[in-house]
Amino acid sequence: MFEIKVTSEFNGAHNLRGYEGKCENLHGHNWKVEAVVGKKDLDKLGMVTDFKIVKNELERILDGLDHKYLNDLKIFRKYNPTSERIAEYIYNELSKKIKRISRVTVWETDSSCATYFR
């Protein structure tokens, strides 16, 4: 099995509704996002897929999150915009354009992250 990984980042604010603690209050993060694509066999060029294609699609999705109050976005009106839900959202959006997404990891700090995969 082969995997490639691209990383990017976005900045945004959120608060966790119903949470008892500091994260209940409005605050922001500089989120780092990792998207991994896996494939058993390489294509005729010897690649899983072109890094540029994955990077461009990831950037397109993150542009919709960057410098936003995430709670106001349609997808997060029903669910808290936790790192877990953000990873799930990015995974689902990426999988519409990129085949064989293995997982998406969202880092909200240098020491805390959440990963979504199927």
Image (cartoon, rainbow, N blue to C red):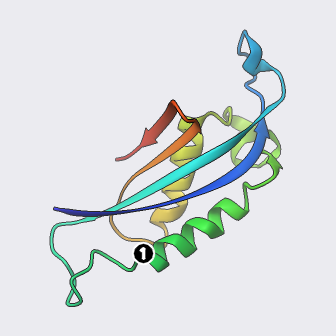
Return the residue found at the far bottom: 44
Residue beneath disc 1: 51
Residue 80 % position (x, y): 68, 32
Question: On the picture, is 64 further left or further right than 107?
Answer: right
Task: Write the residue at 62% across / 67% down.
Answer: 59
Circle 1: element type: helix
Q: Residue furthest top?
A: 20
Q: Please identify the quarter of the rendering in which residue 1 is found.
A: bottom left
The image quarter containing residue 13 is top right
Residue 118 position within the rendered picture, expressed as x and y whole percent measured from the top left = 34, 47
Q: Residue at x 55, y 35 (%)?
A: 110
Based on the displayed image, in which of its 4 quarters is residue 36 positioned?
A: bottom left
Left or right: where does residue 96 sit relative to residue 50? Answer: right
Category of crowding for the residue at label 1, using alpha-carbon neighbours closer than 10 angstroms: few (below 14), some (14–19), many (at least 20): few
Observer-nearest of 98 and 42: 42
Q: Amino acid at mark 1?
A: Phe
Q: Residue at x 20, y 90 (%)?
A: 44
